[in-house]
Image: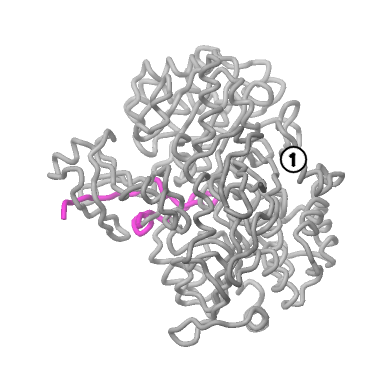
Amino acid sequence: MKRVVCPYCGFGCNLLVDPVTLEVKPYKGEPNLGKLCPKGLHSVEIVKSKARLKRPLKRVGSSMIPIAWGVAIDEIASRLLEMRELYGPDAVAFLASSKVSNEENYLIQKIARLFGTNNIDNCARLCHEASVHALKLSLGTGAQTNPYEDISKFKSVLIWGYNPAETHPVLMDYILRAKRNGARIIAVDVRETRSMAFADYKLVIRPGTDIVLANALAHVIIEEELYNEEFIRSRTTGFSEVRMAVKKYTPEYAETVTGVPTEMIKEVAREFALAGSGAVMWGMGITQHVSGVENALALINLTLLLGYLGERGGLYPMRGQNNVQGAAYMGALSEFLPGYVPLTDEKFRKKVAGLWGVDDLPTERGLYLTELWDAVEKGDVKALYIVGENPAVSEADFMRVRRALRKLDILVVQDIFPTRTARYAHYLLPASAFCEKGGSYMNSERRIQWSEKACEPAYDSKPDWEILTMLGRALGLPGFNYTSVEEITAEYFRLFPELEEKSVEELKNSNGIFLPKKRLHTWEFATPDGKARFMAVERIAPWEGPDDEYPLVLTTVRLIGHYNTGEMTLRSPPLVKLMGEPRALISREDAERLGIKSGDLVEIETRRGKIRMRAEVENVPRGLVAVPFHFKANRLTSSALNKAGTPELKFAAARVRKT
């Protein structure tokens, strides 16, 4: 049996895969401790799928015709170099993938920067980049602070805008262990989620009011002097600004805005503060708003008030894809080098450049993924190289993305399936699936894990690292003479002081290596003065609100049997059966007013477009319609961006009618 990292969520389960039968069993070690969710159990279905891309293809007229690997890479390199010669390096952009290994993400950002551009990004931009920005502003490090194992030790767990029972099912074992150990579970969301079945306190809030509730909890903690005075005095700055800012966010005021009763706000604030330790966990319900950075800062303020960091607590912005944390850490972001180091850090930038055999690297921030499409429309970006992403479905207001994809002079898509995005490609390169190659991945808790090769690549596919090595050579870039994936691992190890003394063999023979260490901020923060910064935040209204024309609020939700754009789960018959037909959730009151019953076909419309879907009358608040993540939902969602470049996927004004 080969130990392989699951290709789905960011929890980072290990699978034991039989190289002959491809049978999957759960790994009994960390982090999943013998547990798997349905997606993990059926993960090899994508490997066996007959829909796989089988050979390189090139567009000729309206047809895609087979082409030899060497010819494809040479032609692609020639076209990219031509674009650089004619328009400059920033006329080319690269998209990395949260599904491929650290090594492969490291190579794609290395290619981009040696090519001369920082136009390199990945789908972290769509999910937790707001968390990264908030955490770096406040604590100096933009990542989850504690390992999963700490959750079961804490005496309170605050889950906000996040539904772990469906998004990270194996993580629920840690949360329930905490509950058995006496922890109080507090869940905050815009609807009653499956996770709320396990909560001691269930706070259903009106969409877009997270800051008001968080500031109201802080108000109670400060007014009743429940805060950790010693921690605040010795390890933080900015407390007085937050104290002043939250004065007006009384529980009574918060009730009028959020819908959460005054006494419930007071009780939860006291319960969380007096617990003595606590985890704060959040997801897209916090980040995918125009106030996403500020939402995350408001939650960080709560932990700083109580000193819930280090041994006494942790911040858990739970990652959605199996290597989205790794992609970001490897530098596949337009504003950061590997390790979230800013491009402007001359000392580190020179270190990276020296390792790559050049004098320096470009310093100007590249385009965010969410800014890319306007740049294509304006003609500033002519060529795009995509590895393992499907923006024609995953991006907000995706019709504008599809228009942009049509305008590109050259689009290269490197993937395992012919995705919706692949329809616009000039070249399609077949990549190997997760267990057909070796490499390392970083899960949400920053644990780097080795994933073994369990079987040979199907058809004429190649591991992404091999394809990118071929491309780097064809582009004439220095340092692309890799003959094994382990050579790339050893190279990125040299960028991080914590890994310089480690070997690839150590990684392979362990349960993972935490980067930079297992538990952050135990003694000091990664800020210039070693102290965390309180950041006062005020309520920020959504980009658009309901009105007479669009009286409902549309939000997107995840399902346990479905994953992102569906390219993987929809090719797995057991998961398709588990998921059933996706339905739009609507309240009983709204359904009665609109004459809708469960199973009726309805039309959902926003200012961006309309989709049809069957309705499910459920226990959701009046005025809310919740649509399963991706499918067709992003025809409707708003592309308004927050400070980190993340779109407001969780809030759009909508209307619904029975068809």
The quadrant in which residue 62 appears is bottom left
Percent across and percent down for residue 217 are 47, 22
Q: Residue furthest right?
A: 501
| The stretch drawn in magenta includes residue 636 | yes
Query: Quick check: 301 left or right of 622?
Result: right
Q: Secondary structure at mark 1?
A: strand
| The stretch drawn in magenta includes residue 101 | no
Q: In front here: 536 or 318?
A: 318
Residue in view at x 76 percent, y 52 percent:
345
Instruction: Find the magenta span and give its range.
Output: 632-659
Percent across and percent down for residue 34 are 59, 34
Percent across and percent down for residue 223 are 50, 15
Using the rendered image of the protein, determine whether residue 327 is visible from the camera's viewpoint. Answer: yes
Q: In front here: 81 or 368?
A: 81
Work out whether 294 lies above or below 229. Answer: below
Q: Which residue is mark 1?
A: 513
* Mark 1 neighbour density, 10 Å: few (under 14) some (14–19) many (20 or more): many
Percent across and percent down for residue 656 are 22, 50
Amino acid at circle 1: Ile
The C terminus lies in which quarter of the figure? bottom left
